Image (cartoon, rainbow, N blue to C red):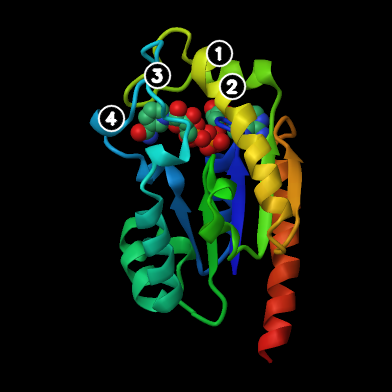
Amino acid sequence: MHCFPARMTNGGKSTLSNSLHQKIPNSCIIAQDSYFKDDSVVPVDNNGLKQYDMIDALHMDMMMSDINSLRRDPESFLRQQCQKLEPTTMTVNTEVIVLIVEGFLIFNYRPLNEIFDRRYFLEIPYDVCKRRRSLRMYTPPDPPGYFDGHVWPMYLKNRQEMESMVSDIGTCPVLFLDGLEPKEQLLAKVFKDVCEELERLRGKLQ
Ligand SMILES: Nc1ncnc2c1ncn2[C@@H]1O[C@H](COP(=O)(O)OP(=O)(O)O)[C@@H](O)[C@H]1O
Ligand SMILES: NC(=O)c1ccc[n+]([C@@H]2O[C@H](COP(=O)(O)O)[C@@H](O)[C@H]2O)c1
């Protein structure tokens, strides 16, 4: 099973994904943030702002290849991950493995979009997003004016593109989540939903 918390920057994806991973045995996380291209190849716009919030700034081919490796041979992939992740959740029972893929542009990449069992989209308002973002340190750090000059306009553009892409792919619907809700409440909601999906999948396997 693949479940996907997406997608606003600072919407709470990593927080939710890590908590889900802790609660779900046989789960693992693939995070889109790990696939950013090197800074030297990310283009700059006319205002001198690095174009990080575009699908082209990411090695999506590599991300997809890792996901496909996991799907082909989950046991060895999970054993490798096991050495890196908290051992508590990893028992490597390959009957049903939950792959949590999190990222701010995962619904804008068609091959990935086609394999979802569950899709979640965390939303927060502009001012909260801007405040949370100002407390984060990226490498390289956001230059002055980056949020209003690049991050937010690209979020609006990418969201529009995502909405048309998602609606023409006939997989599961996107469940929109209010990222202002307390973390525990969001976790409980998604955990319940994932458990229901797992029950359904286990039923199909019997
Ligand atoms: N439900 C929530 N309520 C309040 N703050 C949150 C919530 N979820 C995450 N945060 C905070 O927002 C910031 C960004 O969260 P993070 O999970 O890293 O976002 P993302 O992975 O979407 O960029 C962190 O400081 C985190 O503690
Ligand atoms: N990890 C990196 O290499 C890197 C570099 C510069 C900006 N970013 C920012 O990361 C954001 C996406 O990640 P989050 O969803 O975790 O905020 C994008 O808005 C992008 O501007 C990441």
Residue 36 sits in which quadrant? top left
- Mark 2 and mark 4: span between their CA atoms? 20 Å
In the displayed structure, would residue 188 be above or below residue 57? Answer: below
Residue 22 makes an appearance in the image: no
Residue 73 sits in which quadrant? bottom left
On the rendered structure, is 31 left or right of 120?
A: left
Residue 166 makes an appearance in the image: yes
Which mark is first along the chain, 1 or 3?
3
Assess disc 2: are there few (<14), some (14-19) or many (≥20) residues with their C-alpha within 10 Å of its C-alpha.
Answer: few
Q: Quadrant of the C terminus?
A: bottom right
Which mark is on residue 148? 1
Q: Which residue occupies 72% across, 63% down?
A: 170
Q: From this viewpoint, which residue is outermost toward the bottom?
A: 206
Mark 3 highlights which residue? 45
Which mark is first along the chain, 4 or 1?
4
Mark 4 highlights which residue? 39
Q: Are marks 1 and 4 in contact (CB under 8 Å)?
A: no
The yes-or-no answer for disc 4 within 8 Å of ligand 2 is yes
Q: Are marks 3 and 1 in contact (CB under 8 Å)?
A: no
What is the three-letter code of the residue carrying label 3? Asp
Which mark is first along the chain, 2 or 3?
3
Residue 75 sits in which quadrant? bottom left
The mark closer to the camera, 3 or 1, is 3
On the rendered structure, is 25 left or right of 161?
A: left
Q: Quadrant of ligand 1?
A: top right
- Mark 1 and mark 4: span between their CA atoms? 20 Å
Assess disc 1: are there few (<14), some (14-19) or many (≥20) residues with their C-alpha within 10 Å of its C-alpha.
Answer: few
Mark 2 highlights which residue? 153
- Mark 3 and mark 2: span between their CA atoms? 13 Å
